[in-house]
Image: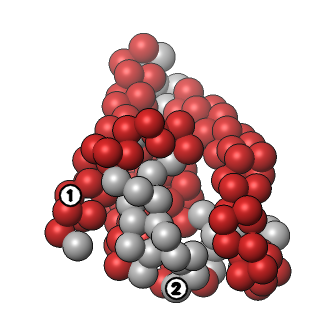
Amino acid sequence: MRCLFVRAVVFTVLIPGTVAFVVPSGIVREFPIELSLGVGRYIGFLPILFGIALYALSVFSLVVEGRGTPLIWFARPFRFFLGEEPGKLVIGGLYKMTRNPMYLGVISAVLGQAVLFQSGALIVYACCLFFIFHTVVVFIEEPHLRRKFGEEYERYLKSTHRWVGIH
């Protein structure tokens, strides 16, 4: 189990860490501050912390309940290093409320940074991320999970929202 957590942390640093923190820091450096929120900008820490917690709890469920790591489709060639995707369908914890809490955690962290750094460019980046995540979920992940878990996944699709409040 410890090995799974280590691999999940490595995955998190390499992929979501890059998408949620490295790229936004580059965007903030390259594009001037556009918003004027004053002291109110510090409210941005709340969605950042919320996003980190959402992501961390999701990964915990994948490791403990699913006995796998959050391996994403394009990282499969590196599974010897990043671990295997869960062998069991994870439907507990946050996965009872949304089928994609990890993606929502990343979006939340990016939006929090948009507020904190007063960056309109990060709001655009977050919208682009959502579009990319939605496309990947609909056209790659869901078909893969349908094939892998069959009727169990079909029941899960009917009972749990893809995003928050959206089937």
Identified at 57% across, 81% down, the residue is: 91
Rendered image quadrant of residue 56: bottom left
Above-or-below relation of 45 to 91: above
Identified at 67% across, 38% down, the residue is: 132
Disc 1 crowd, CA 10 A, few/some/many (<14, 14-19, 20+):
some
Above-or-below relation of 57 to 69: below
Rendered image quadrant of residue 83: bottom left
Q: Which residue is mark 1?
A: 6
Disc 2 crowd, CA 10 A, few/some/many (<14, 14-19, 20+):
few
Answer whether residue 85 is visible to the viewer in this image: yes
Q: Earlier in the sequence, mark 1 or mark 2?
A: 1
> Which mark lies nearer to you, 1 or 2?
1
For the view shown, which residue lies furthest in the top direction? Answer: 30
Q: Which residue is mark 2?
A: 92
| 86 sits left or right of 12 in the view | right
Identified at 35% across, 79% down, the residue is: 64
Residue 133 in the image: state x and y as whole percent: 65, 46
Quadrant in which the C terminus appears: bottom right
Residue 15 in the image: state x and y as whole percent: 39, 40
Identified at 32% across, 38% down, the residue is: 14
Which color scheme is applied?
secondary structure
Element class at badge 2:
loop
Task: Judge by depth and name the residue closer to the eye, 3 or 106.
Answer: 3
Residue 109 in the image: state x and y as whole percent: 44, 51
Above-or-below relation of 33 to 125: above
Residue 71 in the image: state x and y as whole percent: 45, 51
Q: Which amino acid, mark 2?
A: Gly
